[in-house]
Amino acid sequence: MKYIWTEDAGAGLHYWQLVNHYLLGDEYIVESKQSNQGLLDAVRALDKEVNNNYYIAFDVIYDNMDIMNKYIDLQVIAGASNGKIKLIDITCFEYIILAFRDLIEWTGTKRKDKIEIRKAVLSAMKGHQIDFDQIYDERTMNYLKGFKRFSTERVMKSLVYELTDQRKWGIKGMYMGECWYKDCCIIQSEQQNCVMESMSGTEKIERLLHDTETLRLIRVFCKNDEG
């Protein structure tokens, strides 16, 4: 059996289910362990003689030491598993959506300040964290300083939630908003926004899943197939 385990529930879990369906031929069992601690505990509980293959989507945030300590534990366990446990090199689900090249066009968001901050933050990403040395405008710096408990993940969540604040594009619920994978129009200021009416739901989710970040993440599955 082959499993994808994620710490995400809700829309983040739904994303991995869509990856499994559209990119991996439904070959994997996708399960949520509800939190990073729950995911670590589940991996620790596996028998030493691991017979199944496990792909672990554990958020890697360099500026969160609690997360990194857990991730180091996962690396040790995976390293001793004879290749049965593989770690997916993910920052977080929200980063995947934030970095999607068509995000602003598709959602039709008018939040010009957050659109510019998004550009600056994405340009400043280094590895799995925001590099403050690469932030050059005062507005973005002030935005980042406004987080009482700063972490790259908190910034990603805050930005992407504001840029996908329409219900049908939202990613905060149990599922990704239906406009990501269904035909849809959005009512904005009493007017219909059918910016994506030329693409079917299937075409849209295929576009998202073939974007740079998702394709980078699924390389671990391709490497296993080659092996």
Image: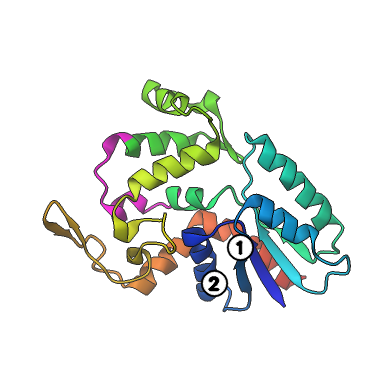
Secondary element type, mark 2: loop
Residue located at (36% from left, 52% from top): 103
Q: Which residue is mark 2?
A: 23
Residue located at (68% from left, 38% from top): 66
Secondary element type, mark 1: loop
Q: Specify few, some or many for label 2: CA neighbours under 10 Å numbering under 14, 14-19, or 20 or more.
A: some
Q: Which residue is mark 1?
A: 218
Kind of residue at disc 2: Leu
Tally of numbered discs: 2
Outermost residue toward the top in this view:
138
For residue 45, side relative to residue 157 (left or right): right
For residue 216, side relative to residue 18 (left or right): right
Using the image, determine if residue 127 lies above or below residue 169.
above
Give residue 173's mark: none
Marked residue nearer the N-terminal end (2 or 1): 2
**Residue 8 percent location from the top left of the image:** 56, 57
The residue range painted magenta reads 99-113
Give the Cα distance between marks 2 and 1: 9 Å
Toward which corner of the image does residue 142 lie, by quadrant? top left
Asked if the residue at tag 1 contacts the one at tag 2, i.e. Cβ–Cβ closer than 8 Å, the answer is yes
Residue located at (63% from left, 74% from top): 29
Residue located at (53% from left, 70% from top): 17
**Residue 101 percent location from the top left of the image:** 40, 51
